[in-house]
Image (spheres, coloured by chain):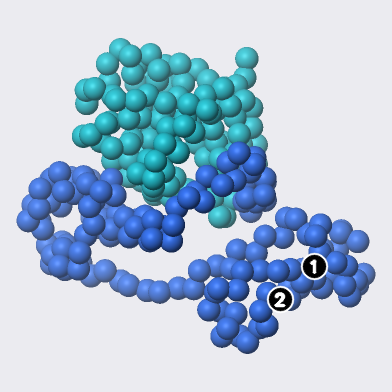
């Protein structure tokens, strides 16, 4: 069954947009809005994505196999808390590039992905969204 | 341009005020982080197709690899001396230009507008707009009012 998502941050030119998974939105929003430090970091990451920039230090592909090609991660505070919001990249019918923030994963412990992270990445890889 | 994704009025109420708690000072901090990152991005792009490593950038300007990672993350900023070192190390010149930001008129919702000067081939309409932009003052347009010639032939 397709998952639902909602528009969270559109780009000024309408070519890109950040969406949020409806089922996980409360957890993700609580994380982003917990304090200014997190909100500012989220704003920086969305500015990078919506501006069409490539900055693997804060947003990168997480494709571990063919089924997870469109899975990415927003990286919060690398080397500190090392939190992640796993995302799915999709295109709308109108051609808008959409990043759906799908699953929050706090305190990623190791640099390499371990089974817990891989399970989340595979789950997100299987998500299909209604936009 | 896709209005569905451009129009911030399409945002659900619960997300519309997401960044409202950020002050002007916070936004300037984020803009400064973006600027620092853009300089590194420009160096990277100039050096393509060679994929420039963070270690190479760090060594070129006498900083640690960790410092460069922090600039990419927005946790540290480049200063003018480091920009000058980047120019020298990679034998490049940053081409600096200033440009007026777009005015970003949003024509997708004209429901609040009065029908004035209705013509067969379109409308002349007015809409309240932000006035803290210097461009309005430059053109001596009165506060809060801006004329827009918008050829909405199908709207009538």
- Front label number (2 vs 1): 2
Q: Quadrant of residue B122?
A: bottom right
Q: Which residue matches tag 2?
A: B145
Q: Mark 1: which secondary structure? A: loop
Q: Mark 2: which secondary structure? A: loop
Q: Residue at x 33, y 40 (%)?
A: A58
Classify the position of the C terminus of chain A by image quarter. Answer: top right
- The answer as to whether the residues below labels 2 and 1 share one chain is yes
Q: Residue at x 49, y 73 (%)?
A: B100
Q: Which is more toward the observer, A70 or B136?
A: B136
Q: Is residue B33 above or below residue A20?
A: below
Classify the position of the N terminus of chain A by image quarter. Answer: top right
Which chain is drawn using cyan?
A
- Which numbered disc covers residue B151? 1
Task: State whether residue A15 appears in this view.
Answer: no
Q: Residue at x 37, y 74 (%)?
A: B97
Q: Is residue A129 above or below residue B81?
A: above
In the rendered view, does A32 fall on the left or right side of A112?
A: right
Q: Is residue A98 above or below residue B130?
A: above
Query: What is the count of numbered marks?
Result: 2
Which chain is drawn using blue?
B
Parent chain of label 2: B
Relative image position of residue B47 (x, y in whole percent): 23, 55
> Do the residues under discs 2 and 1 have CB atoms within 8 angstroms?
no
Q: Residue at x 71, y 76 (%)?
A: B145
Q: Residues within 10 Å of mark 2 (few under 14, many from 20)?
A: some
Q: Quadrant of residue A68?
A: top left
In the rendered view, does A69 fall on the left or right side of A14?
A: left
Q: Is residue B14 above or below residue A109?
A: below
Q: Which is more toward the observer, A46 or B27?
A: B27
């Amino acid at each position: 069954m397709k998952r639902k998502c909602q528009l969270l941050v559109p780009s000024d030119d309408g070519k890109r947009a950040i969406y949020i998974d409806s089922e996980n939105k409360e957890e993700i929003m609580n994380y982003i809005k917990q304090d200014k430090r997190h909100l500012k970091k989220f704003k920086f990451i969305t500015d990078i994505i919506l501006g069409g920039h490539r900055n693997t230090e804060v947003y990168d592909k997480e494709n571990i196999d063919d089924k997870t090609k469109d899975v990415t991660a927003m990286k919060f505070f690398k080397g500190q808390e090392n939190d992640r919001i796993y995302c799915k990249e999709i295109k709308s019918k109108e051609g808008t590039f959409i990043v759906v923030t799908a699953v929050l994963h706090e305190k990623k412990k190791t640099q390499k992905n371990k089974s817990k992270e891989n399970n989340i990445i595979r789950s997100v890889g299987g998500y299909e969204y209604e936009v | 341009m896709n209005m569905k994704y451009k129009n911030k009025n399409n945002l659900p109420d619960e997300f519309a005020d997401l960044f409202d708690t950020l002050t002007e000072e916070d936004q300037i901090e984020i803009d400064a982080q973006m600027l620092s990152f853009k300089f590194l991005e420009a160096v990277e792009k100039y050096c393509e197709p060679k994929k420039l490593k963070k270690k190479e950038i760090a060594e070129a300007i006498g900083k640690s690899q960790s410092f460069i990672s922090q600039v990419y993350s927005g946790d540290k900023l480049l200063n003018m001396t480091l920009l000058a070192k980047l120019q020298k190390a990679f034998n490049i010149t940053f081409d600096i230009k200033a440009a007026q930001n777009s005015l970003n008129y949003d024509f997708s919702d004209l429901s609040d507008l009065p029908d004035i000067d209705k013509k067969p081939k379109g409308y002349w309409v007015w809409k309240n707009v932000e006035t803290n932009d210097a461009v309005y003052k430059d053109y001596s347009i009165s506060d809060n009012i801006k004329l827009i010639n918008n050829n909405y032939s199908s709207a009538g």
